[in-house]
Image (cartoon, rainbow, N blue to C red):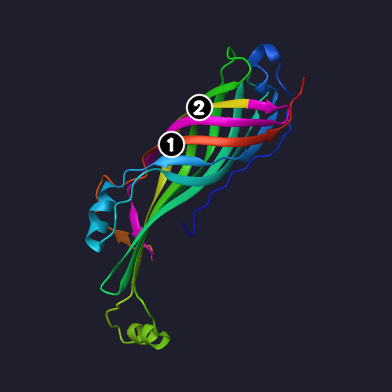
Amino acid sequence: MKKVIFIYLFLTISYFSQSESQVGWIAKFGGAGGFSPVILFPNYDEVNLQIAKLGMNNLSGPLYAWGGSGYAYVMLIDNLRLGGIGFSGFQTENSNVNNFENEVEYSLGGGAATIEYTLPFVKKIALSVGFMLGGGELEIDIYQNKNENNWDDIWNSTANNLAEQNKNFQISNSFFLLAPTINADIPVTRFLAVRAGLGYQIAIGNNWEIANQQKIINVPSGLNGNSFFIQTGIFIGLFAF
């Protein structure tokens, strides 16, 4: 994805810890941040109906997105933490038909603020429920190119308004992102924790545009950024006793 990598990485460790009796050992982080890959499971059905016409295999399986995230506890409200996350990933398929290289790239990413409540009755780990609130983008890039390209032919076809043999379409949908989440942060050392979590991304907004920001109509309703996801992470922070 060319223009979307939203990285909200909060590494500020600026708050004091809560007591062990409140939220357990891991909740003693005033704040933490780090590397946070996300595994998404999009619905590729509408795209696969079209790329089959180009002789391509179906897009399938999870989409692995790189990202970062972080949080800090809000001392005014026990067990509440605020933070942010950003992620972006893509899948591609390609084929060679009649000496044309066809390629489709499916990209999905987003950035959001996070609000979580750490359950105080769970000890030794920080088990938190909450939600993400932000924005995202689904982008599909479609390429069809000859095996060889001539500099003059590219400009002549443009100047003379001729139909191109080489084609490049970029279509995108920017959406409002809302995702309920549940995350477990598990301490490894006094300064390191790992995360495992689940969520479901709800994409609100179905305005599709082509590369020059022209509106696209008749886009199937099943093509959207909705996706179940798994969140992982390695976080660095400070413990206080």
Is residue 217 visible from the viewing direction of this image?
no
Residue that numbered label 1 is attached to: 229
Numbered mark located on residue 130 in the image: 2
Crowd class of label 2 (few under 14; some 14 to 19; many from 20; radius 10 Å): some
User: In terms of image quadrants, where is residue 70?
Assistant: top right
Crowd class of label 1 (few under 14; some 14 to 19; many from 20; radius 10 Å): many
User: In terms of image quadrants, where is residue 228?
Assistant: top left
Is residue 215 visible from the viewing direction of this image?
yes
Is residue 9 found left or right of 202 in the rendered image? right
Is residue 51 found left or right of 83 in the rendered image? left
Which numbered mark, 1 or 2, is in the foreground of this view? 1
Residue 52: x percent and y percent? 24, 57
Residue 65: x percent and y percent? 49, 46
Residue 187: x percent and y percent? 65, 26
The quadrant of the picture occupied by the C terminus is: top right
Q: CA distance from mark 1 to mark 2?
A: 14 Å
In the image, residue 223 above or below residue 239: below
Judged from the image, the secondary structure of the residue bearing numbered disc 2 is: strand
Mark 1: which amino acid? Phe
User: In terms of image quadrants, where is residue 69?
Assistant: top right
Where does the magenta region start and end? 187-211
